[in-house]
Image (spheres, rainbow, N blue to C red):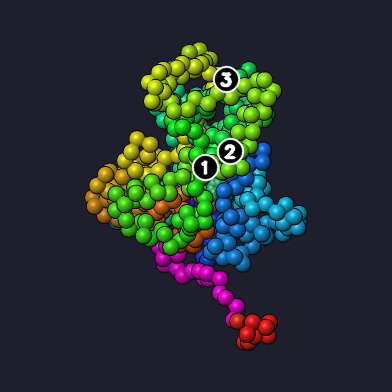
Amino acid sequence: MSEPYDLIGIGFGPGNIALAIALEEMLPGVKARFLEAKPTANWQEAMMLHRANIQHHPSVDLVTPRNPRSHYTFINYLFENDLLFKHFNLGLEYPLRKEYAKYVQWTARHFDHSVDYNQHVKEVSLVGSDLGPQGYRVKTAEGAEYQGRILVLATGRAPYAPAPFDKLLSERVFHLNDYLPRINRLVEQGARRIAVIGASQSSVEILLDLCNRFPDVEPVCFIRHFSFRLKDTNPFMEASVHPEHVAPFYEASEEDKARINADLKYLNYSASDMDILKDFYLTLYEHELDGRKRVSLVNNHEITSAVQDGKSIRITSKHIYQHTQEERAVDAVVLATGFRDLGPGAHQERIPALLQPLERHLRMDARGVLHVNFDYSVNASERTGRIPPLFLNGLCEASHGVSDAGSFSLLSLRAGKLAQEIAQALDRKVTTPFPRARPKAEGSRKELGHG
Ligand SMILES: Cc1cc2nc3c(=O)[nH]c(=O)nc-3n(C[C@H](O)[C@H](O)[C@H](O)COP(=O)(O)OP(=O)(O)OC[C@H]3O[C@@H](n4cnc5c(N)ncnc54)[C@H](O)[C@@H]3O)c2cc1C
C-alpha cells in the first residue's frame, strides 16, 4: 500500500493530463498520483493511420483555452521541438493525428514523477472509520494498492459493441480501439475478408487503411443508411462546442437534451469529413479502372445475426426497404460503432464499470443512472449521506453536452474547473486560476495609428 495521496487520478489520457497541468499551474504542491494502464502516455494509438488528421483546432489543446501562456501549449511543443516553422510551412488547418499524439506524449513526460504506468485499475472502494468514508482505495491488476482523499475518474468512454457482435468479441471481432495491432496480426495470418461495421469517420478511415496497406484484403462495409454522411462542421454548428453552451445543456430536460443531440448528431457522429469521403470514393473508382472491385458496400442493411463458424464469422443482413436477406462470411469484424455515454439506453451505461461496486453509496437519478453535478462531482446516496470527493473527467457528454466527452473542445477549461473544486475540497486556494492580463500600455493603440 502506498502512502495516502490528496488525489488519485485513474487514466492518464488527455483528460487527466490536462488536469495534471491545471494542478501544477493552479494548485502546486498537491499530492496527486495518476494511474495509467498503458506502458506510456499515448493518444488513440490504435488508430494512428497514415495521413489521418485531428478534428479540432490545434490550439484547442490540453491547456491553451484555460492558459494560453502555459508551457504545455501545442505551439510551445512545436517550438521546443524545433518544428515551428516547418509546421507552419505545411499550411495545414488540422495537423496530423500522429503529430498531435507526439504533443500529448511530450506533455505527459513532464509529469512522469506523478504517474504510475502499467497500472490497470481493477477495483475502487471506500476507506474510512466509524466517522464515515474518508477516502478511496484503488487496486490494480498488477497488485499495487493506492489510497487517496479525492478520486478523479478519467478512463475515457467505454467502447460500444452492438448486438449481435457483443457476444462474439474475440481476436477476430473487435472495436476500433484495438484496430492497428489486431488487423496487422490478422492480415499476417491470412485474413482477407474484413467487415467494417458503421458509417463513422473512423469507419471510412479504416476502409481507406485496408485498401491502401493490404492489396489482398477485400473489405465489406455494413451501413444501415443510404450511404456515408458528411459531417456538419460549418462554423455555426461548430460553435455548439463553445463553453457558453455547457450550462444551458446541463439545465435542459432529458427531452430537450435529446432534441439538441439530434440537432447536433452529425457534427461528431455517424458522419465523415469531405477529404476522406472524396479520397475513399476515388479509391473505389480506381479499383474499377483497375478491373478489380475490392470493396463491398452493403448499405441500407440491418444486421440480423452474426455467428462464429470456425475462423469465419457469418453475417446475415436484411435490406431495410426490399426486405431481402444476404449472408456473407468474413475473416474478421471491426466495430466502428462508437462509445458508451452515461444513460439508461442499451448503447449506454448507467454507471462507469469501475464505480459499479460503489453504486449503493452513490446518488442515482430516477432512471437509475449515476447523477453527475455541474462541477463533475457525484453525490452520496441518501443512505450513505457523505462520500469523499469523486469527480468524472471526460465521461459526461450525456449530462454536459457534445463538447464534454468525445473531444478536446473543453478539456482544458474542465481541468481548470476541476482544479478549483479540488482546491476547495482540500481547503486550499488556487494560485492563478486564469492568466493575469498584462496591464495595457497607455495609449498604445493610438501610437499604432488606430485612432
Ligand atoms: C480514433 C479517434 C480519433 C479521435 N480524434 C479526435 C480529434 O481529432 N479531436 C478531438 O477533439 N477528439 C478526438 N477523439 C476523441 C478523443 O479521443 C478524446 O477527445 C480524448 O482522447 C479524450 O481523452 P480522455 O482522457 O477522456 O480519454 P482517453 O483518451 O480514452 O484516455 C483514457 C486513458 O485512461 C486509461 N485507462 C482506461 N481505463 C483504465 C484503468 N482501469 N486503469 C488505468 N488506466 C485506464 C486508458 O489507457 C487511456 O490512456 C478521437 C477519438 C477516437 C477514437
Asked if the residues shown at circle 1 and circle 2 are in contact, with their CB atoms under 8 angstroms apart, the answer is yes
Mark 1 — residue? 230
Residue at mark 3: C-beta within 8 A of ligand 1: no
* Percent position of residue 328, x then y: 49, 17
Quadrant of the frame with the C terminus: bottom right
| Residue 277: mark in rendering | 2
> Which residue is nearer to you in this view: 297 or 195?
297
Mark 3 — residue? 193
Q: Earlier in the sequence, mark 3 or mark 1?
A: 3
- SS at badge 1: loop
Amino acid on which disc 3 is placed: Arg
Q: CA separation, marks 3 and 1?
A: 26 Å
> Which residue is nearer to you in this view: 382 or 338?
338
Residue at left 46%, top 32%?
226
Q: Earlier in the sequence, mark 1 or mark 2?
A: 1
* Percent position of residue 396, x then y: 41, 50
Image position of 404 (left or right of 114): left
Image position of 416 (left or right of 83): left
* Percent position of residue 13, x then y: 54, 47
> Which residue is nearer to you in this view: 90 or 144?
90
Amino acid on which disc 2 is placed: Leu
